[in-house]
Amino acid sequence: MDDPAIVLLSGGLDSATVAAVAKRDGFRLYALSFSYGQRHAAELDAARTVAAQLQAKEHRVIDLDLRVFGGSALTADIPVPKDRSANDMESGIPVTYVPARNTIFLSYGLAYAEVVAASNIYIGVNALDYSGYPDCRPEYVTAYERMACLATKASVEGGNSMSIVAPLISLTKAEIIQLGTDLGIDYGVTVSCYEATPAGEACGRCDSCFLRKKGFVQAGVPDPTRYVEGAAAP
Amino acid sequence: MDDPAIVLLSGGLDSATVAAVAKRDGFRLYALSFSYGQRHAAELDAARTVAAQLQAKEHRVIDLDLRVFGGSALTADIPVPKDRSANDMESGIPVTYVPARNTIFLSYGLAYAEVVAASNIYIGVNALDYSGYPDCRPEYVTAYERMACLATKASVEGGNSMSIVAPLISLTKAEIIQLGTDLGIDYGVTVSCYEATPAGEACGRCDSCFLRKKGFVQAGVPDPTRYVEGAAAP
């Protein structure tokens, strides 16, 4: 089987794993990344590397205009929290939440799927590590899929339905790392840090670094992340 | 009542009518338009005029990157059909269909709604005149609304739900024109033509012009559309 599948590829650890899963599932990969400001330029470089390593058929990078998005630490001038404990992170929706982000990402993915006649869109949402994010919950993904099945030309013409595939949704970070390691992912090239340097070095102190570091420890896999000086892995 | 509502405002006849309906319904308007290529610059000017006339609280214009959208006459180098009969227009999905367009538009609307704490998103989809478009059907709108209700921060925190309001969905073009005329809309400033000139003059020959012209005739309302020379109203 060599059907096309869309993979939303941020260049982080989760989406790299999902891309490897889509490849394992036998799909021809059409990777889709989003460029929204300089803060994540290093992630895009990582996405390009992962797409190349997995021999994606195509990799498109969409420029996102974030003027409607105000109010998130990832898109506005709100400081990214540092050095928070797991308990801190469990209280409410983090300021790094971006309104409707996954909905917008999936919607571009849906457009791309129609254009290349794909019936599967892979996304690395995870309900455990990001329990505060509404658009990472299984019920959200199911509802998106139902909508997507009605949104496309194929749905009128009696063609294929649309599947939103979220293979990581109920995995712990350690399980994700184990899965990707088994599939040969080189996590050293991926970037998860909310404030990575342009060269892709991680701060080691934001929530995303915290979860990632802990995941490697729990998985018993050596952490290949490149940290900025003074922020060594635990 | 002075609650905020998002209105997707293209600058065409339908969305101008929807904006007037949202205002009639007592909402404070947050208008949202999309810029995707020069072909529709005249529509954006029209959107700005309509937003100003309806005293919108805000009007944002989002730049859309269409690199995933290939394959539509509105975004690629496919000729817009001209001089088609009503019968021609009923056969299948028109080449002017843009993959997942309403899904993407609504998703930006959803982000905007979260930011301004709106619980209503108005959209001018219509199931009669655009029967070939999957994302203009009532079942699509319902499915989008269900998804949207699960997608937002408020849905986790026990706040408001999200309504996708599509007041034109089952109206004929003549009924839409009658409704907007009753609400005081100046249709002379709106632009529906797929190939309007930069000054906003309509070609009079594309499907959109055809439906609009017929609508004014059937509504018995004088057609204020500015046509290019030689393409007079019927």
Image (cartoon, coloured by chain):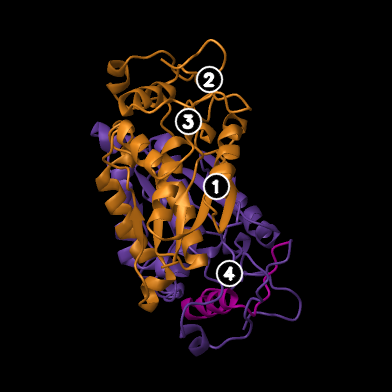
Chain colours: A orange, B purple
Q: CA distance from mark 3 to mark 4?
A: 36 Å
Callout 3, which amino acid?
Answer: Ser
* Residue B180 place in picture, x, y as percent: 47, 62
* Residue A62 place in picture, x, y as percent: 58, 48
Write down the chain letter for disc 1: A
What residue did someone put label 1 on?
A53
Q: Based on the picture, tell me whether residue B119 belongs to the magenta stretch.
A: no
Q: Nearer the viewer, mark 2 or mark 4?
A: 2
Callout 2, which amino acid?
Answer: Tyr
Q: Nearer the viewer, mark 3 or mark 4?
A: 3
Placement of the C terminus of chain B among the 4 image quadrants: bottom right
Q: CA distance from mark 1 to mark 2?
A: 22 Å
- Tell me: B87 left or right of B49: left
Q: CA distance from mark 4 to mark 1?
A: 32 Å
Nearer-the-camera pick, B90 or A37:
A37
Nearer-the-camera pick, B133 or B116:
B133
- Tell me: A232 left or right of B188: left
- Label 4 crowding class (10 Å Cα cut-off): few <14, some 14-19, many 20+? some
Q: CA distance from mark 2 to mark 4?
A: 45 Å
Q: Are marks 2 and 4 in contact (CB under 8 Å)?
A: no
Give the quarter of the image for residue A110: bottom left
- Label 1 crowding class (10 Å Cα cut-off): few <14, some 14-19, many 20+? few
What residue did someone put label 3 on?
A192
Do pointers 1 and 2 mark residues of a single chain?
Answer: yes
Write down the chain letter for disc 4: B
**Magenta stretch bounds:** B199-222
Q: Secondary structure at mark 3?
A: loop
* Residue B87 place in picture, x, y as percent: 49, 89
